[in-house]
Image: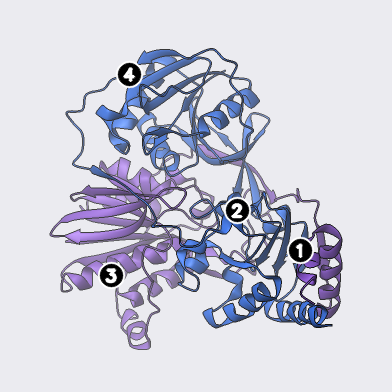
Amino acid sequence: MNILVCIKQVPDMESRFSPNDAGTWYREDGLVFRMNDYDTYAVEEAVRLKERLGGEPQVTVLSIGADRVAEVLRKALAMGCDRGVHVRDAQASLKDPWQIASLIAAYARHMRFDLIFTGMQSEDRGSAQVGVLVAELLGYPGVSTIVDFAWNDGVVTVSRELEGGLRGEVTLGLPALFTCQLGLNSPRYPTLPNILKAKKKEITVLLPETLSEPQPLVSTLSFRQASRKGTGIILDGAVEEMAEMVIDILDERTTILRNKGGLG
Amino acid sequence: MKILLVGEIREGRLRESVGELAGFSAALGAEAAMVLVGDTTQLPLFDGTLYLADALRYGQYQPDLHKRLVLAAVEREEPDYIVLLHSSYGWDLAPRIAASLGVAQISDVIALADGAFEVGCCNAKMRRIVKPHTSKAVLTIQPGAFPVLQHHGLPPVVHSLATGTGMATSLQFSGYRGAGRQVVDLAGADVIVSAGRGVGKKEQMEIIRSLAAVLGAEIGASRPVVDAGWVEHSRQVGSTGQTVAPKLYVACGISGAIHHLAGMKQSGFILAVNKDRDAPIADVADLTVVADLMEFVPALVAKLAGRRNG
């Protein structure tokens, strides 16, 4: 069995973002990049299935992006994937979901993967499109936002996360594609021996133009900080003084401390 | 301009989101039709053409069939935009429609921007203005971003919609499951102290618990904290957990993902404690303290306790 996991490298979301020169996306200088959170669950699920089936399935991990994405491919290999594919594309962060999905599908089409895992969305763009688009382009059944994955002799039963604590249960055969929601499993931390082993695993580098050259379907006109809609007070300063001020404000604006104040 | 709205049902019931779709249509000033795979006995209050397919025949989650039904309605209406809610139904179905039509999709629209659309990115801290290149486009709109449009009273004009089920995939939907009995009902609490990813590690939950104790509060949590197992699932606040509106909501280390805000923004007074002053939680908070939780919360607890004893 052949499994594909698609991962993205994204900046830490606590970073301060500023627009690039074209004003279409963030400037990368000074940002710390890591594996997209959702994708860590995709990697973990693929590796768990491989382990469960005695190591037989071959797990390929693919990422599209600049040289820096080799770091997340190495991490996925250290988590237990067998080989990496790096579609080296310095322009990837400017491509739209349709272009990214077309590149993945062009690679996956002739590899005939039985099972594909992706994250349900990226933390930076957050379109939640790429995985489902890949399924459509390949003609695979695809199920998004899974929080449970059960394997039973080639038949897969998954739970989709719906709103309000509800789940929907879906059963299907292979081939299939799943997009993974947070909480699907507990992604492992690579151990030192596995990090060392991963250094010997192969990463194939491909150039995007050898796969597909789709035109963008959307363009970004501008990229900016979300303007603060809030009219709330912001306190910044010494902790002791802020604690006093918070108590004063709560006293004035809520009845909570008055009620509890009765205790003492 | 013509738009086609895609309604949705869940557990056999029509979703209230139909009103938000109509509100979006009104904001756009468009002529709207709606397509729904639903219950033929529960028509949406929608003043216009309704293309209706029976969920008993086409299922509640059969994405391939639902896609084909929407495409059949697209063929009849030739809309400029096909609009779904950015919900677990909408984000699953929208890319399938866009791929079949070979058109652009814009996800999670929060506002109109002069022929283009405003969307959030980077965990809602940043915004983009995005424009489709294709003559048609698929849009998903953020829940809560557009006001619900009240219906005028006329029932929809219903056209029944059908497609062959012969080529349906092997995919089977076997039903809904609840997240389990709500062990903790946060809806009744006057004060909730909620923990987010910023708490850092499980041991540091003790600091959050000490604040809850001194305020007589229930503990709540954002999704990453529940996923990490620091707090039980029944205390999750947000669109995939409970919706709460206490008199005081204290958000500790919660950045304010849209799914969390949906569950708590109606609270009477919101106090946020966060290191990142740009975090979206500051948009809904009445008071934001920019500080390290591990320093600020113990200081606040000490002062509150001192006041109680003093």
User: Residue beneath label 3, please?
Assistant: A47
Do the residues bearing badges 3 and 2 touch, measured as CB atoms within 8 Å? Answer: no
User: Residue beneath label 1, please?
Assistant: A256
**Mark carried by residue B204:** none
Q: Residue at x 38, y 18 (%)?
A: B75
Q: Residue A12 in the image: x percent, y percent?
A: 57, 67
Q: CA distance from mark 4 to mark 2?
A: 39 Å
Kindly state the secondary structure of the residue where label 4 is placed: loop
Closer-to-camera residue (A212/A258)? A258
Do the residues bearing badges 1 and 4 touch, measured as CB atoms within 8 Å? Answer: no
Q: Work out whether residue A90 can be spotted.
A: yes
Name the quadrant of the N terminus of chain B.
top right
Q: Circle 4 marks a residue in which chain?
A: B
Do the residues bearing badges 1 and 2 touch, measured as CB atoms within 8 Å? Answer: no
User: Residue beneath label 2, please?
Assistant: B244
**Mark carried by residue B161:** 4
Q: Work out whether residue A113 can be spotted.
A: no
